[in-house]
Amino acid sequence: MATKSGFTESFFDCPDGGSLYFRSYGNPNNQPVLCMHGLTRNANDFHQLAQFLQESFYVISVDQRGRARSSYLKDPMAYSPETYLTDMTNLIGHLGLKRVYLVGTSMGGFMAMTMAAFDPVLFPKIILNDCGPEIGSTGVNNIASYLGKGEIFKSKEDAFKAIQQRHMPAFPNFSNQEWNDHIFANMKENKDGSWKFDYDQSIRVLFEAASPSVTDLWPIWEAITSEILLFKGELSTLLSNETLKKMHAIKNFVSHEIKGIGHTPTLNTQFEQESILKFLL
């Protein structure tokens, strides 16, 4: 365990022998907030939000298995919702948390929905970032075009240019600093100075094998009784306006459309962070 940059880094030994990296911000006696990232991302994505919330909350963000500092799985088919949800259950038990607010981006949002549906007492409030019970096919196809391809970029500059070009439709208004934060939050430098994505490329195996029914979470959505705050990117190809309307028809909750951004909003703007704080307090 080491402390730097205002957070504490820890590793949890999973029952199957793997390890789960997590970082924590703020006073452990405060109300816990657990942040869960998207498919290829990691705990770095929540750094600015956690810094903002740490005065009032105990914020925990996790690298899911196969991402960044957490251990990789031997069986690619084990990169499944069941594994991720089991890990979260075990981590929450290890930390002795009795009432947890959830923040989930994309895949992490699907996890938050499932966790809240099955235990609304443990998870009374959830924040969903650009995700819902249906996933847009355009967004899925876009992810499939680059997921787990084992790309190697000769230099940091090459990585920046290539990924900026790839994701420009989702983030047309990003500043140079925002691009740097987004791109290098889930990349690592090799010994020869080249750069690669910081996740197990084999997570693509289950992604490619999954049928559309796997991502049908409408029964889960209908079962949720927890309070919900949702952010949707105006340009999102994963969460459509039609899906959001259907979600509102089923359930009463607050949603905000973030202008000029796709999948996913950063949760780093003043509006987003103040909305989150107001919802959680």
Image (cartoon, grey):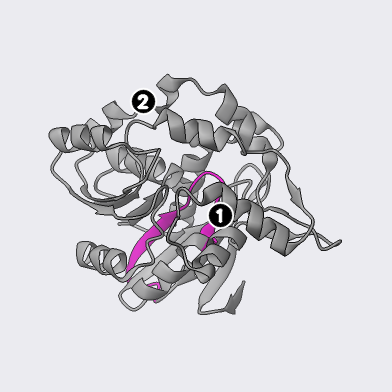
Give the Cα distance between marks 2 and 1: 25 Å
Picture coordinates of residue 181, whole percent (x, y): 54, 66
Range of magenta residues: 27-44
Residue 63 got which mark? 1
The amino acid type of the residue labelled 2 equals Asp
Contact, mark 2 vs mark 1 (Cβ under 8 Å) = no
**Residue 17 shown left or right of residue 207 in the figure:** right
Residue 95 got which mark? none
Residue 203 is drawn in which quadrant? top right
- Mark 2 vs mark 1: give the one in front: 2
What residue is rendered at 49% in x and 61% in y? 45
Q: Residue tagged by mark 2?
A: 216
Picture coordinates of residue 73, whole percent (x, y): 67, 40
Residue 120 lies in the magenta stretch? no
Picture coordinates of residue 164, whole percent (x, y): 58, 55
Indicate the secondary structure of the residue bearing disc 1. loop
Q: Name the image quarter holding the N terminus.
A: bottom right
Camera-side residue of 17 and 35: 35
| Number of other residues with Cα within 10 Å of mark 1, as a class: few under 14, some 14 to 19, many 20 or more | many
Q: Name the image quarter holding the C terminus.
A: bottom left
The amino acid type of the residue labelled 1 equals Asp
**Residue 105 shown left or right of residue 116 in the figure:** right
